[in-house]
Image (cartoon, rainbow, N blue to C red):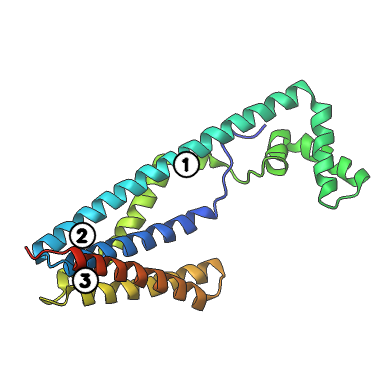
Amino acid sequence: MPKEGHFINRSNWLRASVLGANDGIVSTASLLVGVASAGMDRSGILLAGLAGLSAGALSMAAGEYVSVSTQQDIETADLERERTALEDDPDYELTELAEGLEARGVELGLALEVAQQMTDHDALDAHAREELGMHGMAGDANALQAAWASSVSFALGAAMPLLGAVLAPQGMTVWVVAAVALLALVILGGAGARLGGAPVRPSILRVVFWGSLAMIVTSAVGRLFGVHV
């Protein structure tokens, strides 16, 4: 029997961190560009950026906590059903496992032999991987830890355009924030692509395009509805 726990795909952690930082950069930069284009004064811009950072980080934490907790609940229920099935009808489960291996190209006789060996080694683990598609133990993936990691990655991303707003000369907030955000997106997009083994150029172009579009739209909205305060 395996240790008590749940099964997850650990490769999603890096992806979630990169996406969290990317969200922090784009959403906060767009907010800052929007309120700056609306004519808000410096203190108001910084307050809006800080509020956006705080709200976004908390939202990411809550969303990640709910997501991981829900996934764990579903996987726990699936594993419990599989454990019960193994106890009630082990022969059928063995045949089912062998059929799954056969469907993936293993010869029938060898599939039965492999299924038996997998069952003898760890029946629940074998069925979790082959039938339910679960890989790795999720007992190590605490929902609070996931929420914390997601929140921190968003906050770090959001801090970049906010720092640009802090350092921007008077009247240059929009341009400085946009430049800092785009530079951060280029670095993050390139790093994420390299770590994931994906082509760097398309990844950078995607994040720059959508980040630019978001800031252009919020800037236009700010100019359209803005009132100097």
* First in residue order: circle 3 vs circle 2: 2
Gap in angstroms between the C-alphas marked 2 and 1? 28 Å
Gap in angstroms between the C-alphas marked 1 and 3? 33 Å
User: SS at mark 2?
Assistant: helix
Three-letter amino acid code of the residue under disc 1: Val
Q: Quadrant of residue 187?
A: bottom left
Residue that lies at the very extreme toward the top in this rendered image: 88
Which residue is rendered at x = 69% and y = 34% of the image? 124
Where residue 3 sits in the image (x, y, percent)? 60, 34
Say if mark 2 contacts mark 1, CB within 8 Å. no
Camera-nearest label, 2 or 1: 2
Which residue is rendered at x = 85% and y = 53% of the image? 105
Q: Locate the N terminus by quadrant.
A: top right
Q: Which residue is mark 2?
A: 49
Is residue 107 left or right of 93 when viewed as pictured? right
Where residue 44 sits in the image (x, y, percent)? 11, 60
Q: Is residue 55 above or below residue 221?
A: above
Residue that lies at the very extreme toward the left in this rendered image: 229
User: SS at mark 3?
Assistant: helix
Q: Nearer the viewer, residue 52 or 8?
A: 52
User: SS at mark 1?
Assistant: helix
Q: Which residue is mark 3?
A: 164
> Is there any visible trace of residue 204 in the rendered image?
yes
Within 10 Å of the Cα at label 1, are there few (<14), some (14-19), or many (20+) other Cα atoms?
A: many
Q: Nearer the viewer, residue 64 or 11?
A: 64
* First in residue order: circle 1 vs circle 3: 1
Tag shown at residue 158: none
Q: Which residue is mark 1?
A: 68
Is residue 97 left or right of 181 when viewed as pictured? right
Within 10 Å of the Cα at label 2, are there few (<14), some (14-19), or many (20+) other Cα atoms?
A: many
Within 10 Å of the Cα at label 3, are there few (<14), some (14-19), or many (20+) other Cα atoms?
A: many
Camera-nearest label, 3 or 2: 2
